[in-house]
Amino acid sequence: MSIQAGTKGWSKAFVAALVDPSSPVPKGVTGGRAQVDPLRFAVYRNNVHVGLVEALRKAFPVVERVVGTTFFAAMARAYVGWHKPASPVLLTYGERFPEFISDFAPAARLPYLSDLALLECNWLQSYHAADAPALAMSELANLDELSLAHASLVRHPAARTVNSRYAVGSIWHAQKAGRTGKIDAGKPEVILITRPDAKVEVTVIPRQDARFASCVLAGSTLAAAALKAADAGAAFDFGIALTGLVRKGAFTSIANGGETS
Amino acid sequence: MTRFDVLPDRAGLGLKAEHYSDIVEAWPDVGFFEVHAENYMGDGGPPHRYLETISARYPLSLHGVGLSIGGEGPIDNAHLGRLRGLIERYRPASFSEHLAWSTHDSAYLNDLLPLPYTELTLARVCAHIDQVQDTLGIRMLLENPSTYVLFAESTIEETEFLTRIAEQTGCGLLLDVNNVMVSTVNHRLDPFAYIERFPHGLVGEIHLAGYDETLDSAEDRLLIDAHGSVVKPDVFDLFRFTLEKSGPKPVLVEWDNNVPPFAELYDEAKRVDAAIDAFRSSQDVAAQ
């Protein structure tokens, strides 16, 4: 008899009853008394939910602060019902939470909530991303003007941007600092997330630099990015914008300094 | 890179991210630290940075929660590969997993689920452990589960099931004393008799933790393996009884939920060390 034959099926029945709260205790499941109390089987159902809701609470502390613990727990439980993890590595379990929130009707009065969750997803990715030394300003200073123009920069593994129609970077900072007061949530923001050392940093990119930052982080040469940024607004200053990104640890190296690609 | 080859026979603590800075500032006198392997499966960042630093100063125990060794399906090779990467990187003194399952049709259910104890499930668990030990190149420890239900089709008692697995695969055992209390109370069995039956010569590590308690519809006690409080007095008594049977072992205090300030967790380690010292003194007196 093969190992796979015989008792095949006990786990299937167990899982079916586990994920469906209305289903009875599966056949053949017993306890210390002749009749097993459904409450005992329910411990397993509860553990699955509580563990996954807790994983989401840890990943989305600012979303939880905005909506409150009760609302968050209900929203997280609904997510757990909609989407089970595919892997025992729960670090990425919340990656579809922003998508879920955008369709979660009870959260519709907070249209920015999905992007705030997206910011926290990126924060967590940055926290767990590979380590690498960040590009120093001195390395750029060695390039002549022409080389600098043709250079593109290699994004640091922990660097991310979130492009939002809402002011979710400002909201994130206010919540983290426990600041109250009005924020115009409807103001679009580009947010840079970096981990220059051990600490993840969240930076709202000045409006005039947002286009430049997005282009450079997407791999454009500095000259091409600067041209696009200059189109977007007169307040753009190449030196200030570039220094800001480099100082935040957004890059690891110069990709093609001095060479045209 | 050789680190610590064995866990010492004294108290160790679960390493929580909340306590990283407390530990690297004070270097507390703790026998070893244990981490959940799945929490270190990211590419880099602060978790690995702290674990590198801490595992250079303390013996490390790597404890998996997601391998689903007791499952009907095959072992997930991708997950096994991630474990191998961690073992190669950190060279832990010990690797342990659970007699339980958590994955079904590629969905991860995030709990340690129970299995029937039959000749068929025994053969499957042994095949899984052979595969794990061959791939990881390490002798693993298998932990007794906390359970809330039983299976009518089970034909083998749990301590016998674990003993036979260890004999067939060469793996060691991890005796979780809190799990013994949770399961035996839940199934109206005698926890002391369970400890007496356990093959202590195969035990490489002991776990202690706090349980939660409620009543079921029949008003029977229902204990839940919660890892969210101090070790309860009856579990500590059962641990002292275990020491008399097994002698000193590496003893981990687990506290994974409602994580307290580090000082409170450290007090639990000191309480365990004091119990081990008291046991050693009593042996010395008896030997005189």
Image (cartoon, helix red, strand yellow):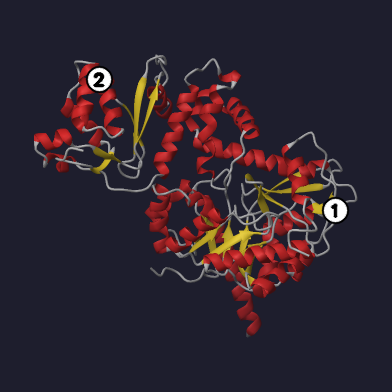
User: Same chain, marks 1 and 2?
Assistant: yes
Q: Quadrant of residue B74?
A: bottom right
Question: Would you say the residues marked 1 and 2 are in contact, meaning their CB atoms lie under 8 Å apart?
Answer: no
For mark 2, what is the residue?
A: A208
- Give how far across and how far down residue B279 sits, in percent: 62, 72
Q: Quadrant of residue A16?
A: top right
Q: Chain of mark 1?
A: A
Q: Which residue is the extreme one toward the front?
A: A261
Q: The residue under label 2 is which amino acid type?
A: Gln
Nearer to me, A229 or B279: A229
Which corner quadrant holds the N terminus of chain B? bottom left
Q: Which residue is the extreme one toward the right?
A: A34
The residue depicted at 74 percent of the width and 50 percent of the height is A11
Q: The residue under label 1 is which amino acid type?
A: Gly
Which corner quadrant holds the C terminus of chain B? bottom right
Q: Which residue is the extreme one toward the left?
A: A144
The residue depicted at 63 percent of the width and 58 percent of the height is B208
Nearer to me, B171 or B119: B119
The 10 Å Cα crowd at callout 1, few under 14, some 14 to 19, many 20 or more, is some
The 10 Å Cα crowd at callout 2, few under 14, some 14 to 19, many 20 or more, is some
Residue A258 as seen in the image, left or right of residue B132: left
Residue B88 as seen in the image, left or right of residue B193: left
Q: On residue A32, which mark appears?
A: 1
